[in-house]
Every structure is written in C-alpha cells, then in structure tokens.
Amino acid sequence: MNDHKLEEIYTKDALEMQKQRYARAAAEFRTLYGTDATDVFSAPGRTEVGGNHTDHQYGRVLAAGVSLDVIAMVVPSSDSVIEVKSEGFPLDRVDISDLEVKEDEKNTSASLIRGVCAGFAKNGHRIGGFRAYTTSNVLKGSGLSSSAAFEVLIGNILNGLYNGGEVSDVEIAKLSQFAENVYFGKPSGLMDQMASSVGGFITIDFKDPEEPVIEAISADFSESGLSLCIVDTKGSHADLTPEYAAVPAEMRSVAAFFGKSVLREVPKADILANLAALREKVGDRAVLRALHFEDDNDRVVRQADALRKGDIDTFLALVKESGRSSYMYLQNVFASSAPREQGLSTALYLAGQLLGDEGAFRVHGGGFAGTIQAFVPANKLEGFKADMEAVFGEGSCYVLSIRPFGGTRVRLGD
C-alpha cells in the first residue's frame, strides 16, 4: 500500500473542495471522539466500462476507479472494538474478538466490517480495534459500488494500522469480496472490489480468480472530446437480491450442463450446438444470459485493443453492442418482479434520443435499478445533463474522471 498526497489523488479543479471536505471530516472526528485523527484513508467508487456480469463467471472486465470516494479519519485503539460513524448513518460498533457470521447482521455495514476482519485473520494478517469517522460521495445505490469502496476502505485501514501496508491491493479486493459474499450475503463477483482497490483504468482477466491478470489501459476520454457520465435513475435496490442472485445461478446452470462450474470453461460453440437440449433443461433465459456472457467476455478484449490503438469509434460501437446485449439477452435492465419500475429503460431511451449517433450508452453495473453509463460529446454535455436531471432529479447525472489510485492512506501534508 502506498501513501498519496491530496494533490496526487484529486484533479486540480476539485482540490480546494476536497481540502474543505477533509477539514470538515477532521472536525467531526474531533467532536465525536475528543481527539485528533492520527491517520486518513480513502477508497474510490468504481465504474464498469466493459464486461457486464462477466466477473462471477471468471471472465474479463474493463473497469476504473473514479473521482468519487469514501474517506475515513481514524485513530487506532488498544481494545478489540471497531467503531465506525459514517456521515448520515448510525454508529457501527463491532467487537472483532468474535469473527463468526451473524445472521442478524446480514445486509449491514457492520457485517462488512466483521467480514473484512475475518478475511484478514483467515489469511494470517493482523487485526485490531480503531475508531473512525467516514464521509462518502459514492452515493449509496448510485451504481458506483459504495459497498466495495467501504470494504476496501476498511481493508486499507487494517493494512495501514496493523500490517505495515504489506497486504497487496489484489488481496484486499479478495478479502473485501469474501466479506460481501459471506458476511453481507450478496453473491457479487470480484470486479467492484478490484477496481476500487487497484484504481486507475484497468482490464482484469479472472480466468484464475486466485491470480487475476490486471493490465493498465491508457485512456483519456477528454482527449476525444467525451465526458464519462453516470445517470442515477433513483430506482430502489430493495428486495432485488433474488434478481441479482439469479444471474450467476442461471449462468452456472448452463455451465453445469457441460460438467463445468463457470461459463469461462465452456466454449460458445458448445452452447450453440446444444441449444435445444439446454432450452429444455435450464430454460431460455439462462441460455440467453450464457450467450451474453460469451459475447461480452470477448467484447472486453476488443474494447481494450481499440483503446490501446486510440480507435475511439470502435470502442464506442462496442459499448453500444454491450448495452444492447445486456438489454436483450442478459435482461438486467428492469426487474421482472417489478415491471412498473423501469427507470433504466427510460434513461436508455432518453440517452438515445439525446445522443443520436454520437457517443454511447449502456446499463451500468449490476442493473435492474440504479444507473446507466454514457459517453457524451462535449457539445452535448450541458443539454444531456439538464434533460436527464429534468426527469430523474437534480444531481442525478454525475460527470466523472478516472482516479489514478485505488485504496490509499492519504498524506494531508509533507
């Protein structure tokens, strides 16, 4: 784990605002605990750029850490208690002398704290108590993975306070996913945590999930006159866990037909050659979701290649292809259990009207509710933002930049 200064983490135009934000957080910590924080940590949200629901099948993704983050003012303690007061939420108090899964903690931030600590201990790393105050502009439900940012933040705190920064970014990501899967109870893949922990613009190949292959991609969309926008449709994620869980379960049912555990082990040609039997055995939706995986997994390779060559037109065409595949075959744009709520579909239609043949747009992240992603030409940005916010509310359209670093300890001064 490296330390980074504010000037290295944030863009110049955001630096003064971030200094004020950190000062407010330090003051809140002092009010809460009657002392000054000794350490400061930050972990970014993430955006998925390519590979929609491919990571949990050991596939490929394009992802990036973004300019929105969660920060923590921290002081270590001599006891076994971790207290985290997150702005706008009740204080979490977790005694890490007990690292067993708590069913009544499922779907809470306390479960993530206990789960990350359990992962550290399971892997032979040191853990200890601390007090923290956190504030986040990775808004909950915004599709930028606030939960992964929180998990990675806790991992970085434990790494910095008790392990001398020796735990790698990749391992912190894995332990964060362990906490989300086992303790929080959400069957997510590893992409969210990896993008937040490693940061930058990266392609990740999860063929061997224990040793994922990570490659940095040089991409500056502003040089092509494009802004990366995320539109939050304000859809509720409540009661959607079964919808999310059905995606990897159905994909694995297709893999199981061939005696495999994940789709990465199944050639697309085998699926096509066995369509009739698969439809009868696992159903059409599972087959379509498997075919989406095969195509989107291949698309990531072509997207990364286009970016390396500076071929932005091909990249944008592939973004649109991915969006159509998610809509038609992955079918994660609205929840079948709540057909009246189709904010993502509405946002995608509106994006098409506003952008025409320029830029690109697609569903973002897990889907079903939440956000879409759009690459918007500079001459259309103001109108795009205004029209989206007229439908989905003020502040619903985020214009993001890629953050060069993942989870880190922050140096506030030299």
Image: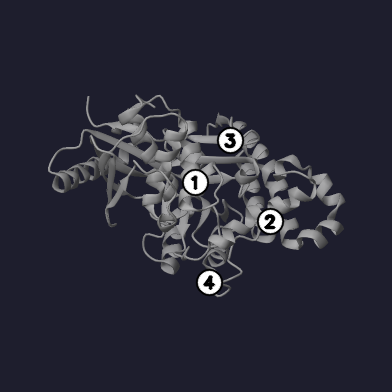
Residue 110, image x, y percentages: 36, 51
Residue 121 relative to residue 354: left or right: left
**Residue that badge 1 annotates:** 47
Q: Amino acid at mark 2?
A: Glu
Q: Looking at the image, tell me whether mark 3 or mark 4 is earlier in sequence order.
A: 3
Residue 310 relative to residue 32: left or right: right
Residue 205, image x, y percentages: 62, 35
Check if mark 2's residue and mark 3's residue have beta carbons within 8 Å. no
Check if mark 1's residue and mark 3's residue have beta carbons within 8 Å. no
Image: 159 above or below 146: above
Q: Looking at the image, tell me whether mark 4 or mark 2 is earlier in sequence order.
A: 2
Q: Nearer the viewer, residue 292 or 305?
A: 292
Which residue: 33% across, 35% down? 157
**Residue that badge 3 annotates:** 204
Of circles 1 and 2, which is in front? 2
Indicate which disc residue 250 carries.
2
Of circles 1 and 3, which is in front? 3
Residue reaching furthest bottom?
340
> Between marks 4 and 1, how big is the CA–CA gap?
23 Å
Image: 192 above or below 108: above
Q: Amino acid at mark 4?
A: Glu
Specify few, some or many for label 1: CA neighbours under 10 Å numbering under 14, 14-19, or 20 or more: many
> Between marks 1 and 3, how big is the CA–CA gap?
13 Å
Q: Amino acid at mark 1?
A: Thr
Which residue: 41% across, 33% down? 405
Specify few, some or many for label 3: CA neighbours under 10 Å numbering under 14, 14-19, or 20 or more: many
Q: Looking at the image, tell me whether mark 1 or mark 2 is earlier in sequence order.
A: 1
Q: Looking at the image, tell me whether mark 1 or mark 3 is earlier in sequence order.
A: 1
**Residue that badge 4 annotates:** 341
